[in-house]
Amino acid sequence: MDYQAALDVFFAAPPVGVAVPDPVAGASPARRLRDALEPVAMHGVWSPGTNAALAEHGYNFLTGYVTGRAAPLGDVPSSVVAATFGVFEPGLVDALWTEGRGLLPLAELIAVRDRATTASLRGVLADADETEVARVADLLERAVADLDGTGRVLFSALRSQPRLDDPFARLWRTADLVREHRGDGHVAASIAAGLDPVRMGILMEVWLGYPIGEYSGTRAWPQEVQDAAVARLEADGLLLGGAITEAGRTTRDAIEAATDRTQDALVGALGADLAGVTAALENWSQQCVDAKTFPPDVRKRAAG
């Protein structure tokens, strides 16, 4: 998939009448922080500048996403990448990881991606107070520095990367670290709730108000696998007629609460600075959305 095709899929205007999902409207402090930083954290994925820089080395949108995100893991089998990502079909991950690994050494890929994303974010946030950007980055860096990495593989791999110097680079990197920390916790909470990757994605999308398959269908699972997952969710009383049931909502709300608990140490480390950091990130993330460097659909921002 090239970059323009990704934009066509993910940047389409949401249907008329789509409301802010209940989990977003009633967000906990941990969820609000996560949603506030998502467009900044994902700048390396959606930035046209980053995608153009990677395209010069042969990457398309999907090889850039998979190889760029997984590069801090090092030279691991694709099965490890698929396991840490959690929701993508392993055959797709294998193909993309194998192709992407053949284009650049991982260290060079990381360097290209870091430079391009820093330049892009600096341009998008050109009106931001650089001192304030550095202050927020510093608060987030201190918050993640001593977090327990047990079971948090993507977070721990990314945290092992050398510290970036530019304030905008540090903001992006620390936002990405918080995102991966919560993502690792969310996968663990979903697996503990008895869900496999396909049911995990489907239950999430209906919880946010997507119709079945609109979001989970982008994860490349064969239709028969998706159909079997829907049938299992219906048999378990979590779906009915394509909609989430009360039991399904209770189950997914419990996963959300468990995911939030995995963030307790992070929220505690930010302490009294949490509200201010979240507000600053919400402002900068909105600028990313306005600059079309992150999808505008609030459901996409909350997916995860």
Image (tube, rainbow, N blue to C red):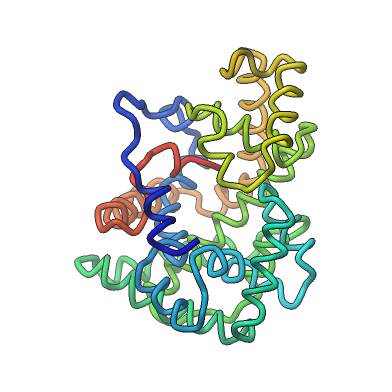
In the image, taking residue 269 as reference, residue 302 lies left or right, namely: left
Q: Is residue 15 above or below residue 122?
A: above
Up the image or down, 260 lies above or below 183; here it is above
Q: Residue, x 35% and y 68% (percent of image)? A: 48
Residue 14 x %, y %: 34, 35
Question: Is 21 rendered above or below residue 6?
Answer: above
Task: Locate residue 83, reporting x and y percent.
Answer: 76, 55
Quarter where residue 143 is shown: bottom right
**Residue 116 located left or right of residue 62:** left
Which residue does the image show at 57% across and 48% down from the upper left?
Answer: 268
Q: Position of residue 99 (x, y in %)?
A: 65, 74
Left or right: residue 294 compared with residue 113: left
Residue extending farthest to the left is 127
Is 162 or 195 nearer to us in this picture? 195
Asked if residue 31 is positioned above or below residue 134 in the image, the reply reads above
Quadrant placement of the C terminus: top right
Location of residue 81 in the rendering, given as x and y in whole percent from the top left corner: 72, 62
In terms of depth relative to the viewer, which is nearer, 121 or 1? 1
Total number of numbered discs in the rendering: 0
Residue lying at 54% horizontally and 63% vertically, measured from the top left: 62
* Residue shown at the point (61%, 39%) measured from the top left: 260
Quarter of the rendering containing residue 166:
bottom left
